[in-house]
Image: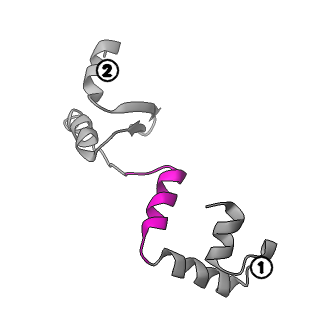
């Protein structure tokens, strides 16, 4: 495949890299996309040649934002702090932790 064809093939996905295990006939591709449809469209181009197993992932900052948005997040953190006896730096509650980390 030529570079122009490769660019057209991935559509709206940003290829972060591809790794191939030629001995096993397998490999991995990592991409960034704004929505799952773009990833599925790219994978569909390869459906006749290989099986594609798509696993969505997010960055640390994206995960933190999603976790903090959960309605029971503060209660869950307080339960972990209580269960572990976390008192490092005077942290005894989620409110203490937010203040300490300037969240």
68 to the left or right of 52: right
- Measuring from the top left, give residue 5's x and y in whole percent: 27, 17
Is 47 magenta? The answer is no
Which residue is under mark 1? 87
Camera-near label (2 vs 1) is 1
Viewer can see residue 26: no
**Which SS type dominates the magenta stretch?**
helix
| Residue span colored magenta | 56-71
Residue in the foreground of this view, choosing between 101 and 66: 101
Question: Label 1: how many residues lie within 10 Å, few (<14), some (14-19) or many (20+)?
Answer: few
96 to the left or right of 64: right
Q: CA distance from mark 2 to mark 1?
A: 52 Å
Quadrant of the drawing holding the C terminus: bottom right
Which residue is under mark 2? 7
Residue in the foreground of this view, choosing between 17 and 82: 82
- Measuring from the top left, give residue 17's x and y in whole percent: 46, 31
Which of marks 1 and 2 precedes in the sequence? 2
Secondary structure under tag 1 reads: loop
Q: Which mark is residue 77?
A: none
Marks 2/1 in contact by CB < 8 Å: the verdict is no
Quadrant of the drawing holding the N terminus: top left
- Measuring from the top left, give residue 50's x and y in whole percent: 27, 39
Is 66 magenta? The answer is yes
- Measuring from the top left, give residue 66's x and y in whole percent: 44, 61
Asked if 28 appears above or below 68 in the picture, the reply is above
Viewer can see residue 91: yes
Secondary structure under tag 2 reads: helix
């Amino acid at each position: 495949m030529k570079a122009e064809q490769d660019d057209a093939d991935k559509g709206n996905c940003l290829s972060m890299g591809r790794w191939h295990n030629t001995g096993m006939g397998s490999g991995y591709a990592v991409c960034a996309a704004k929505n799952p449809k773009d990833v599925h469209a790219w994978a569909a181009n390869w459906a006749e040649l290989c099986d594609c197993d798509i696993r969505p992932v997010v960055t640390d900052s994206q995960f933190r934002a999603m976790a903090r948005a959960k309605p029971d997040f503060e209660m869950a953190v307080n339960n972990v702090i209580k269960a572990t006896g976390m008192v490092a730096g005077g942290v005894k509650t989620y409110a203490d932790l937010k203040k300490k980390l300037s969240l």
